[in-house]
Image (spheres, helix red, strand yellow):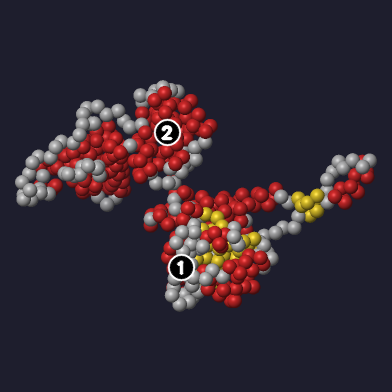
Amino acid sequence: MASSLLDRHTRFVAALREAGLPVSVAEGLDAVRATGLVDLADREALRAAYAATLVKRPAHRPAFDLLFDLWFPPVLGDGAAAPPRPAEPRDPGARRVPPALDPRVQERREELFQLLLTGDEPGLRRFARDAVAEYGRAPGQESWFSSGVLSALSPETLMARLLSAVLTGRDRGGMAEQVARRTFGDRIDRFRALVGAEVRRRIAEDTGVERTARLSVRPPLERLDFGRAGRADLAAMRRQVHPLARRLATRLAQRQRMGRRGRLDFRRTVRASLASGGVPLDTLHRPRRPHRPELVVLCDASDSVSAFAHFTLLLTFALREQFTKVRAFAFIDGVDEITKYFAPGADVVDAMARMAREADLVWITGRSNYGHALRAFEERYGDAVGPRTALLILGDARSNHGELSLPVLRDLAGRARHAYWLNPEPRAQWDTGDSAASRYGEVVPMYECRNLAQLAEFIERLA
C-alpha cells in the first residue's frame, strides 16, 4: 500500500472501532493483505475485501458501508464535484413556485421515473449526485440536507405511475402487483440511501471525515444505549433478548457440566495411593454440590431508567431456569413485588404496562427516593434475601438529595450470598447532581450497564 492509502486504512479501521465494531489488530492486517489481491481502482471489490475481513455480523454491515463510503468515496468526474448552480435572482416579494408547478422539478422527476422503472443503478447513482448538487442546499444555507432533495422530487409519489407502467388490469391486486410494489419500493429506498451517502460525502468535504463519521454512524444495536433507543430500536432490542438469553443459558450449562468435579479429596487420594507404593496416580475428588442461586431483583421504575429496567427484567426472566427462584421488586419512592406480572409466557411489554398500572410504587411524591424504598423493602420483604440469594439492584442511584439508608443496604448485602448494582448512566456522570453512586458503590459493587452487550456480560457473570 502507498503511504497515503495505508494512512487512510489505519484511520478507517480506527473509525470502525470507534463506531463499536470489533476489529482486532490481526483482522486489520488481514484486510491489508486482502486489498493487495484486488484491483484498488474497483471500489466495490475493495469494499468486498474489507467487509470479508472486518465485518463479523450482518447487523454491523450498515455502519461499515456508511464509514466505507466516507473514507473511500467514489471517483467523481463529469463535473459532479462542482458546486451547485447559483440560484437565479428573484424578487424578494415574489411567491416561491411550488415543486409541483416548477418545470425544472417536473423534468427531474421524469428522469427519476425512468431510472426507477429500468433499475439503472449507475444512472441512479449519477442522478442522486446531481440532485444533491441542485437541491441539497437551501438558498442562504451552508450545510447540506437530504430533506431538500427528497421534498423536491418526492420519489414515493411515483409509485402509482411505476405500477401502471408494468401492470395490466388482470395483474392488479395479485402476486404480480406485490412483486412490482416491493421491487419499486426497494429502488426508491436505494435512491434515498444514495442521496444520504452523497450528502454525507459533501458534508465530510466541508467539515472533515472524522467529524462526519462521529455524527452519522450509530453504534451497533448491542452497543446502543437504552436511553437513546427509539421505538424501532426498542423493538429490535426485544427481538435480540431471547436469542441472547438462549446463548447465555447454553454457555452457562456447559460451564456447569465442565465443573462437575468438586474439590480434591486429599485423604481419599492418599489412601488410594497405597496400592501404587504411595504414588498418587489417580486423584479423587469430593462430589460437587450443585448450586443454583436464588435471585432477588430490586428495580428503579422511575421514568429516567424505564428503558433500562425494561430490558434488564426481560433478560433476567428469560434466564430464570438458571436460578432456583426469581423474585422481582420495583420502586419509585414506594416498593411492591412485581414477580406475578412476569409469569412464564407473559409478554414483557404487557407486563411492564400492568406493573405501571397496578403496582403500588408511589409513597408520597412519586419521585425517586432510594432511602425510603430501601427501608420499605426491608420492612415488607426483608425475608426474601438470605444466604443463597443473589441480590441485584437496578437504578441510577439518584435519590433527589433524599436520605440514602446506607445501613439498611449494608444489612441486606451482608445477608445475601452476592450483591450487585447495575447503573445505566455513563460512569463519568456518577456523583454529579443528586447521584450517590460512589456512596452506594462502597456498600454494593456497582457496574455500568447501558446496553445489551454490557447487560449480557454481567448476566453471564451473575449466573
Q: Residue at x 8, y 41 (%)?
A: 89
Q: Position of residue 423 (x, y in %)?
A: 51, 58
- Of marks 2 and 1, the one in the foreground: 1
Q: Quadrant of residue 165?
A: top left
Q: Is residue 172 left or right of residue 355?
A: left
- Counting from the top left corner in percent of width and height, residue 23 is at 49, 37
With respect to residue 20, does 349 lie above or below? below
Q: Which residue is mark 1?
A: 400
Please tell me whether mark 1 sits on a helix, a strand or a loop. loop
> Can residue 191 be seen in this snapshot?
no
Q: Nearest the camera: 244 or 113?
A: 244
Residue 406 % position (x, y): 58, 68
Mark 1 is surrounded, within 10 Å at the Cα level, by few (under 14), some (14 to 19) or many (20 or more) other residues, namely some
Q: Is residue 185 visible?
A: yes
Amino acid, disc 1 = Asn
Question: Horizontal and vertical percent for residue 123?
Answer: 24, 33
At x 93%, y 45%, the residue is: 274
Q: Are marks 2 and 1 in contact (CB under 8 Å)?
A: no
Residue visible at 63% across and 70% down in the picture: 384
Q: What secondary structure is found at the residue carrying circle 2?
A: helix
Task: Return the residue nearer the eye: 265 or 429.
Answer: 429
Among the 4 quarters of the image, the one containing residue 128: top left
Q: Amino acid at mark 2?
A: Arg
Residue 3 appears in which quarter of the rendering?
top left
Residue corresponding to mark 2: 11
Question: Neighbour class for label 2 at 10 Å: few (<14), some, many (≥20)?
Answer: some
Q: Quadrant of the N terminus?
A: top left
